[in-house]
Structures are given as structure tokens and as C-alpha cells.
Image (tube, rainbow, N blue to C red):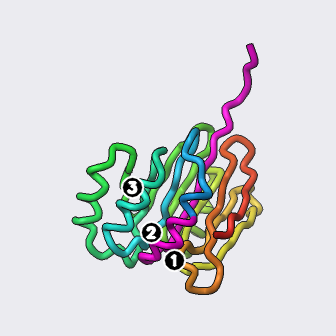
């Protein structure tokens, strides 16, 4: 019998802004088996959250963005899916061996990355793909935008065990 490490994946999405067509294309590029999805805010409408939850069966962790206006209805939608977990404005998560801090805002994420204790800090908001390893070894990551407002629709796949990151263009 073969034994080994289960390949765990984390998909990092941000800034859908109700572009359900781009979201549909993105969801076709992910595999929910042994995977998590971290959404960094700006669904805009509750129907977009529902589409994400129906299209990804693995655990989904949600951070609020500044364009998630109807949080009450978004929360109601999320409560109909047992695999969807709303973290609030910020989060600190452990997914397998991976320790993560997340916020929608770059300024908050940069502050999170100054404090040791995590491997990965994620943010969205500015729609700009960013991936760097800071002097303290923490990875600072913005997956870009699903929306495609600035021409590229992107998200990032993170190998939870190796921290290898792959930008996926929709």
C-alpha cells in the first residue's frame, strides 16, 4: 500500500463584482477535491455567493469586502450551504499545515505580514495580482480579480504543503 502526503490545494479568489460569467469560467478550472477556497471580498450581490457555493463543493472561507453591501442577505445565502464559512472583515485560519491571515484591504494585509506566526497573508481590493515573499518569509498574495475590469481575470492556486503558487488566468 502506498502512503504519502495528500495534495491539498487552496484557491484564492477576490473581487468578482457580480461578473457571473467570469466566475463560471473560473469554477470550471478548479478541483474541489482535497481543496479549500478563500474568497477575499466583493461578491456584490447575494446571487454571486450562491453561484460560488454551488460551483465549489469544498470548504469556502469568506472575507467581507467594501462592496458586499447587503451582508444580512449574503449571510442568509451562506447559511444555506454547510461548506460556506463567513469569517467577517478579517481572518486567521489554519488549513492543514498552512497558517493564513486575510483581509480585503492591502493596508491591513501589510500590517498582518509584519507579525510572524503565519505562512501566507492574502488580500484583494485593488484588483492587482501580487505575489511576494517578505524578508520574514511570509508570502504576501493578492490573487488579482475574477471580474476582469483591468483586462485580466485571475486567481491563484496554492499548494498547501509546499506553498508553491500558480496564477490561473481565466
- The region drawn magenta spans 1-25
Q: Are marks 3 and 1 in contact (CB under 8 Å)?
A: no
Q: Residue 115: which quarter of the image?
A: bottom right
Percent of width and height locating residue 167: 71, 64
Which numbered disc, 1 or 2, marks the residue that appears first in the sequence? Answer: 2
Number of the label disc, if any, that sits on residue 41 = 2
CA distance for labels 3 and 1: 17 Å
Q: Are marks 1 and 2 in contact (CB under 8 Å)?
A: yes
**Residue 16 is a magenta residue:** yes
Q: Residue 47: which quarter of the image?
A: bottom left
Disc 2 packing (10 Å; few <14; some 14–19; many ≥20): many
- Return the residue at label 3: 87
- Residue under the image location 61 percent in, 86 percent down: 150
Q: Quadrant of the N terminus?
A: top right
Which numbered disc, 2 or 3, marks the residue that appears first in the sequence? Answer: 2
**Residue 30 is a magenta residue:** no
- Return the residue at label 1: 125
Disc 1 packing (10 Å; few <14; some 14–19; many ≥20): many
Note whether 34 is above or below 133 in the view shown. Answer: above
Q: Secondary structure at mark 2?
A: loop
Give the residue at the far top of this rendering. 1
Amino acid at each position: 500500500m502506498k502512503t504519502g502526503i495528500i495534495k491539498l490545494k487552496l484557491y484564492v479568489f477576490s473581487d468578482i463584482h457580480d461578473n457571473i460569467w467570469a466566475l463560471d469560467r473560473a469554477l470550471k478550472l478548479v478541483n474541489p477535491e482535497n481543496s479549500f477556497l478563500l474568497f477575499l471580498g466583493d461578491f456584490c450581490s447575494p446571487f454571486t455567493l450562491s453561484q460560488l457555493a454551488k460551483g465549489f463543493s469544498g470548504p469556502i472561507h469568506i472575507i467581507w469586502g467594501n462592496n458586499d453591501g447587503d451582508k444580512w442577505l449574503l449571510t442568509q445565502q451562506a447559511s444555506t450551504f454547510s461548506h460556506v464559512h463567513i469569517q467577517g472583515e478579517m481572518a486567521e485560519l489554519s488549513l492543514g499545515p498552512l497558517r493564513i491571515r486575510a483581509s480585503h484591504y492591502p493596508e491591513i494585509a501589510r500590517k498582518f505580514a509584519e507579525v510572524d506566526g503565519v505562512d501566507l497573508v492574502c488580500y484583494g481590493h485593488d484588483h492587482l495580482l501580487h505575489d511576494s515573499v517578505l524578508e520574514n518569509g511570509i508570502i504576501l498574495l493578492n490573487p488579482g480579480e475574477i471580474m476582469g475590469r483591468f483586462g485580466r481575470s485571475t486567481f491563484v492556486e496554492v499548494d498547501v504543503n509546499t506553498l508553491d503558487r500558480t496564477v490561473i488566468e481565466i
